[in-house]
Image: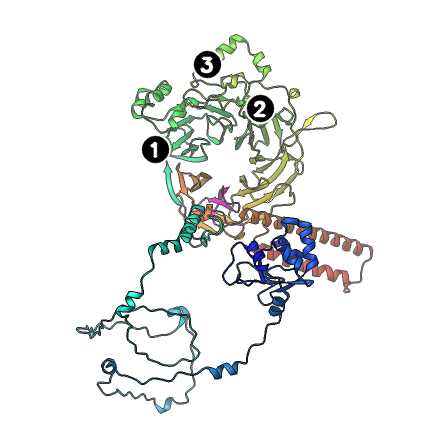
Amino acid sequence: MPSKASSASTGDDGPGLPEDIVPMVLTSATQQHFGCIADEDVTGENPYKLLKKDDILEDMKTKAAVSDFSPVKQIILDYPEDELLLVFDRDFTYGQLFYLVVTPEAKERILNPPQSEPEEDLVDEIKTPEPKDWISLGSEKEIDEESVKETRGKLMYKFSRARRDFGMPVSLLDRNVADTKDGIVECVSYPDRRFNIKVLQRDCAVQAIPILQSSSAQTQWKYMRNSCTQYTPGELGKNEEENTAPPSLNDFYDAVTDRVLHALQQEEIMNVFKDDWMALGTEYEDIDWAGKVSAILMLNQAFSDPNCSQDKEIICIHWHPTIQGVIVAAMAEKKRQQLIRSTGPLIVFYSFSDPTHAKILLECPDDILAFEFCPSDPNVIVGGCVNGQVVLWEISAYASHLHPVQHGHHHKQESVTGDMLGPEDKKHGKAPLVRYSAMSGVENSHTAPITDVHWLPQTFQVTAQGIPVENKSNISLQLITCSPDSTLMFWDVRMPKQARQAIPEKKQNDLESQMANYSVNNPFKYLERIWKPFITVPLVNMERNGDYTPIRFNLYPFTNNINNSNTTISESGGDGSAVTPDYSQLQIPSGKDLTPLQDINTKIYIGTQDGEIVYTDWKMEKNDLDQLLSPKPLHLIKIHPCLVNTIERSPFFKDIVLTGTSLFGSCNIAIWKEGVLDGPLFLLPSLEGLCTSACWSLTRPAVFFVGKGDGKIEVWNILEKTGEAVHVQEHMTNGKITCIKAWTVSSKQHFLTLGDDLGIVRVFQIPPVFYIASRNEKLNVGKCIDQQQERLNDLLRRKEVWQNQTQAAEEQNKAEPEKPGTPTEDQDEMKEYENFLVLEESILKSMGLTP
């Protein structure tokens, strides 16, 4: 009866399985229920567990056929006693991790094994073999010939010492450890060229013997002794060879077929040749790149057109958002006092296919300090001039110049741009000069240079009161500019309905004829002379009765959830190129017909010319007289000593902002968290040169790059060091770095683009150590930010407590003046606390955590 149950439970019994033992497969839930968890409740030293018969029957009754004991149900019912023995079989002796003892006799035999005979009796029974007589076969002669014998007398050396040196005091001297190898004075052996011994003849013994087979075993020798064994090979006779026949080939096939099929099945399921140890973790996360790969940024390409970059400096750079390998740079004259210019201000398009010649030139009315591509239409570009005017370009007619010239399309490209190029330009293949499509009037523009410009996303639009509403066109149509004239201006590229009605038909035709000379297929000709901002937000400083002078600003990174069914830009022409929407047919709708959006973050960070960081809202507020006024800033702190030239949001954390300024010997890099209005989380010192620009890494949350005025690049990692850069690379350029921009082309191509005051754009290949994120880097950065926020809150709480205690002590001193020369206990405590604060401030300054 037990043998049948055993066979049914296992399905594949191993050899020598006793009839009173049943191998069992117990799930983790069953082990936990009966208190027999492997390697916890039962171990190799204590493998036994007594299970009550009633508990097993209750488990089978509850789980029915799902119970692990259901295959041996009848055996358990027939078991005469109340407790069954379960044994933990770590070595899988019977094929499973557990086995159940199904007879009382076996349980008693396992729990109380019989006593073995004394070991002394066994030792007495073992008979030691008697050594046999040594039979010499002539090996003594070979041993005698190979043994080393002295052929000359031994040399004798005598070492003496003067008697006066005995008992002399020991004089010890200091010695540099680095002077010798490994810090040890040693006499290193060296070859002596005076002696050159060549072996002309060597005796080698060769003995021909039959093929032998040797085997070894891991035998532990208890007693080491020298021994020698002499043996002769054993050979089979003729009769023995005839009786010992080799196994047949069919028997061999039957023996190895199962193993071969199993190996083939495993090969189909998984790669058996893959190194599992090297494949642990993800592809890149477990690799420690520190010290294994080069940390040098390698120059990939340099862009410079001698016809338009001479005596120019790069002001702003951007990568083309849709065409790979195209870089756009805004250039300006280095010396503004020059009255004669070789070429005017330009925005230059470069391509990797030809780095020494520009592909497209955008004509600018004045120097451009900032420009940006439209998020929904990359053929539309907006720029801010030094004279305060806003300029628009539309380059859809020249987009073919940015693609590599292909056979069969050359004539079509030339026909599109033939009217803009002269005979000499066509002959030498010069880049087309594209005139701007629209420009704001001087009276309706900023009164100071435009230092920053950003498009609003196509997910929403803003009313005249600054309220975000739905955007049914799904096209980016509005933008924001800032200037040191203490204003933020909102612009719309659509024509207002009132302006369209106010222009007479005759004057409108004359205006169209004048704008026809600006560019081919100009969609923004209606904006000429009437383009003006629809919102002007003044930035008033309530504290010092003045205005803020914004230099840089940063919007909340909105996501662009575009509905392709309603998007005009998604349509394409017959040749597969994108169709530019007809902006002249778009009108500014009334805000009453649009639904307000409540989940849009309208707060922005602003960096001023005085080094202030302003956190404010662009929404207008109404006073008691229903007048729209600019809101009061939510947060204002002067942490930088001078002009703020960088405000960058982290691509991984939308509420983390990086700011930078340029001044020698000061903390000019700060990291902020939106919503934390008490100060920056990190203050990073950068003392070697001016900090001209900075940008986050697009692939590593903890890394950002800083460009310096002396041509250096610093790489910072807030998880490794907060007091200094993890890598500094010099001589990136011979001039001053004016702007930097990180860009990702593919998973293995990550670029860092630099612009300098020599008019050269350089693209450097970022090494893997700076673009491959470590394991859980984003999670660790989040924890680090939370710790810094808690530290800042704790520091503010301590300052508040100290101020309250100081104020209370002053009031008490005024109310009850003490006698001179008798300090009170409270005064002693305050003095001790003041000393503690001084010590804390010095420690924080040494760590670089406070300015």
Marker disc for residue 354: 1
Residue indicated by mark 2: 533
Residue 274 is left or right of residue 630, and the answer is left
Q: Nearer the viewer, mark 1 or mark 2?
A: 1
Give me the C-alpha separation between circle 1 and circle 2. 39 Å
Q: Nearer the viewer, mark 1 or mark 3?
A: 1
Labels 2 and 3: the sequence-earlier one: 3
Q: Amino acid at mark 3?
A: Gln
| Circle 1 residues within 10 Å: few <14, some 14–19, many ≥20 | few
Residue linked to disc 3: 514
Foreground of the two, 522 or 816:
522
Image marks 2 and 3: residues in contact by CB distance under 8 Å: no
Q: Earlier in the sequence, mark 1 or mark 2?
A: 1
Residue 314: % across, % down: 43, 35
Most extreme residue toward the right, as rendered?
Answer: 816
Q: CA distance from mark 1 to mark 3?
A: 36 Å
Discs 1, 3 touching: Cβ within 8 Å: no
Horizontal placement of 585 versus 216: left or right? right
At mark 2, the secondary structure is loop
Residue 593 figure quarter: top right
Contact check, label 1 and label 2, Cβ < 8 Å: no
In the rendered structure, does residue 694 fall within the stretch colored magenta? yes
Relative to the observer, which residue lies in front, 726 or 188?
Answer: 188
State whether residue 21 is above or below residue 595: below
Disc 1 residue type? Asp
Secondary element at tag 3: helix
Q: What is the magenta range?
A: 685-714
Front-lying residue, 726 or 363: 726
Query: Would you say residue 34 is visible in this rendering?
Result: no
Q: Residue at x 55, y 56 (%)?
A: 7
